[in-house]
Image: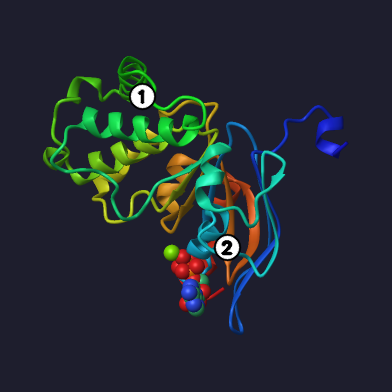
Amino acid sequence: MPDDAMKGNPAPCLSLEGLSKSFGGLRAVSEVNLGVYPGDRKGVIGPNGAGKTTLFNLITGVLLPTSGQVRLFGEDITTWPTHRRTLLGMARTFQITALFPKLTVLENVLLAVQGLRQMKFVMWRLLSSYRDVYDKARYLLERVGYWDRRDVKIRHLSHGERRQIEIVLALASDPKLLLLDEPVAGLSTGESHEMATFLRSLDPDLAILMIEHDMDVAFAVVDTIAVLHYGEIVEEGPTKQIRASARIQEIYLGVG
Ligand SMILES: Nc1ncnc2c1ncn2[C@@H]1O[C@H](COP(=O)(O)OP(=O)(O)O)[C@@H](O)[C@H]1O
Ligand SMILES: [Mg+2]
């Protein structure tokens, strides 16, 4: 039995074990060990070129590591394709928008719920009833305070609001772990604050791992932070500790 189970601690949703990725001679991600537990709000921050996007791609199955393992709820998923990871409870957002701009908020969520049902249940149930799909879409939108705006077309939402709806789509698969890659990139300061509030309002049982360049945004959303520098995690701890760390300040100022 693993140590954690013997101590009565919950099993990690996600664990990265000695994860590395090289591009030719460059080690973009180097021996990364990281655990995300149920309900954790964790951030991975680092300056440009630190390896954040590469790490995200290894976790989501876009890239295969050179060495090391990715475990999801105890399963070794290192070489699994993205859709299998989704079925096991991992969800992600995409930087290229997955929304249909001419359809309404509700229609977009209905399509996401319907699409996932087909993917999950095609073996034994061809289509779930429209009522089930509608109820699920309504639940998702009510949960995040968007039900009143369900009939607004996506193209009439602000950029920041669209980003929030993309996260709602990711939640349609009932994930236990949500992965976010720079969720406020390209948003205004006001929209970034709204996104931070939105993320803070999500189900506390949902674990979130957020990859973020902007320290202040990470500080506003997560409770613990791992700092990536030249592909390695150089410090990990509570937000307060990272905020006070002279080493981290130096890394961000480019003199570390
Ligand atoms: N497909 C690739 N081929 C070669 N080098 C890459 C590739 N992707 C990323 N890199 C390099 O790996 C390092 C980490 O990049 P990246 O993961 O994009 O960092 P970040 O997202 O933190 O800015 C950089 O030096 C980058 O140039
Ligand atoms: Mg990046």
Taking the spot 34% from the left edge, 22% from the top edge, the residue there is: 133
Query: What element does badge 2 sit on?
Result: strand
Figure label count: 2
On the rendered image, what quadrant is the N terminus found in?
Answer: top right
Residue type at numbered disc 2: Leu
Depth check: give the residue in front, 240 or 196. Answer: 196
102 horizontally vs 143: left or right? left
Depth check: give the residue in front, 236 or 37. Answer: 37
Q: How far apart are labels 1 and 2 at the CA level?
A: 33 Å
Vertical position of residue 197 compared to residue 209: above or below: above
x, y percent for residue 245: 59, 57
Vertical position of residue 126 compared to residue 42: above or below: above
Taking the spot 45% from the left edge, 40% from the top edge, the residue there is: 221
**Mark 2 vs ligand 1: CB under 8 Å?**
yes
Residue type at numbered disc 1: Leu
Q: Which mark is residue 140?
A: 1
Quarter of the view holding residue 59:
bottom right
Q: Which residue is mark 2?
A: 228
